[in-house]
Amino acid sequence: MKKIAILLSVLILIIMPVKAQLTATISYTPTTPLPGDVVKGTITLKATTPETVNGITFMTNLDVTPKDVSGIGTFYGEYSLPFTIKTTSAGTYTVKVYIFTENGTLVKTFNLNVINSKPEIVITSPITLNEVNVVHFTVINPVDAKDIVVIPLFKAYPSSIALNNYQGSFQFYPTKKTPLKFRIEFFNGLAENFHSYVETVYPSYKKSSGITFNVSTPHEYYLLYDVIPISVEISNLRGDAINSVKVAVSTGNFEKVVEIPEIPAGNSNKVVVNCPALKPGKESISINVSYRDTLGNIYFVHKNYTVTINPEKAVKISDYSIERNLNGVEVTGDVSNSGWSKVYGVTVMAGNKSYFIGTIDPSDYDTFDIITHNVTSLKVVWQNSLGQVFSNEVKVHYRINAPKKVKSSNSLFIAVIGSLLVIVLALIGFLRRKK
């Protein structure tokens, strides 16, 4: 009998149905909702054998749709139930889900953390006053913010910034230290969860280094009417590029402007402007630099530079001689260029005659030869490299007398015969006295 009882027990265990395996998982978004957000989730049931589910009930202080579901029935495999939760104020809320089956009740619990924290703008680099800044910023995102748009509430470009990887940038020209206000717009996880609010940022400011420019010339002094090469080197110490850089050099009635298209940030550029030496002594040369930034703002910088001008003219007749001949007067001499620059169109004038030399290099000379009739002065005329015409004159105080009249050949013959006759008579008288 004991053996029969054991055998019956084993048979009963073999023919009894195995209890079905039922699992439940819950997913939802946004995982970090803000007050007033809608949270959408899904309960997924999986059964490895046919399972009868009588109902599902949510237990929480929040508004859940649907709260109760009944009559789900028997299923095998997977069953999904979508649900929606409407949040109110910040806090941590416990949500319990009761799943009623014929084999018992399965309970799933999750906590929904509703926070007040929102995306924040962080500007790490200082902003420079009175120049164009490209301001880079990062948005710290503690929630499931999507499609974040930052709108500067001040004059900036662009006026609306769609973030890429929670980072953005804009151009800004500040003139004083002031807080910056931004409107931040985003969707927290779902299209239903649109948020818009204003954030105030207090960035760090610094002064602009602007530009500097140095003025120099290659020599300590210049001769009158020489050409002075004014070298102007401009250094852009700003954090942005400058363009349409104009260098204006002026002295007396002379002015010349040279333009540099652009000088990038942290770079330098140099121009050389030729300026005439117009007055002996200390000549003041004015240098004005103007430029624009990328937003079109115009800036001006001014500096005076003094150059020593020797009263001696750069070009002169350094040596000359005047000789009379049958054709009149021959004037020869040298023209010297004692200046630092080449001269052109050099011409020497004596009386009503002129002699063209052409070009003379600096610290060089050339010769001239003029035949004229009346000469009271010698004058040299030349052009500098700027096309300006100058002259230098020297007085010679020399005038040729009118030519004497020449007697005819008959008169000359009679005079010679008369002279010979006088000599013969004198000789006869001498011989008589001797006897």
Image (cartoon, rainbow, N blue to C red):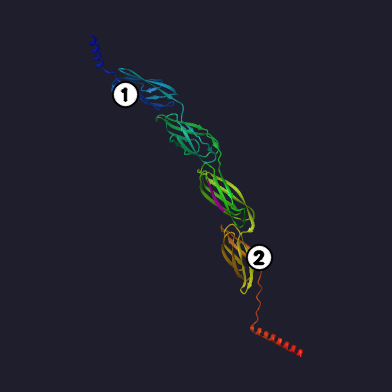
Q: Quadrant of residue 299?
A: top right
Residue at the spot x=53%, y=50% of the render? 259
Residue 46 circle label = 1
Q: Which amino acid does the dot numbered 2 rest on? A: Lys
Disc 1 secondary structure class: strand
The answer for how far apart the CA atoms under marks 1 and 2 are is 123 Å
User: Which class describes the residues within 10 Å of circle 1: few (<14), some (14-19), or many (20+)?
Assistant: some
Q: Position of residue 341 (x, y in %)?
A: 58, 57
Badge count:
2
**Circle 2 residue:** 395
Image position of 302 (left or right of 417): left
Residue 194 circle label = none
Disc 2 secondary structure class: strand
Q: Position of residue 218 (x, y in %)?
A: 59, 53
Q: Position of residue 266 (x, y in %)?
A: 52, 43
Comparing 113 with 22, the one in front is 22
Looking at the rendered image, the quarter that the N terminus falls into is top left
Q: Give the dominant element type of the magenta stretch: helix, strand or loop.
A: strand
Q: Is residue 425 above or below residue 223?
A: below
What segment is highlighted magenta in the picture? 268-273
Does label 1 or label 2 sit earlier along the sequence?
A: 1
Is residue 216 covered in magenta? no
Comparing 324 with 55, the one in front is 324
Q: Is residue 199 above or below residue 396?
A: above
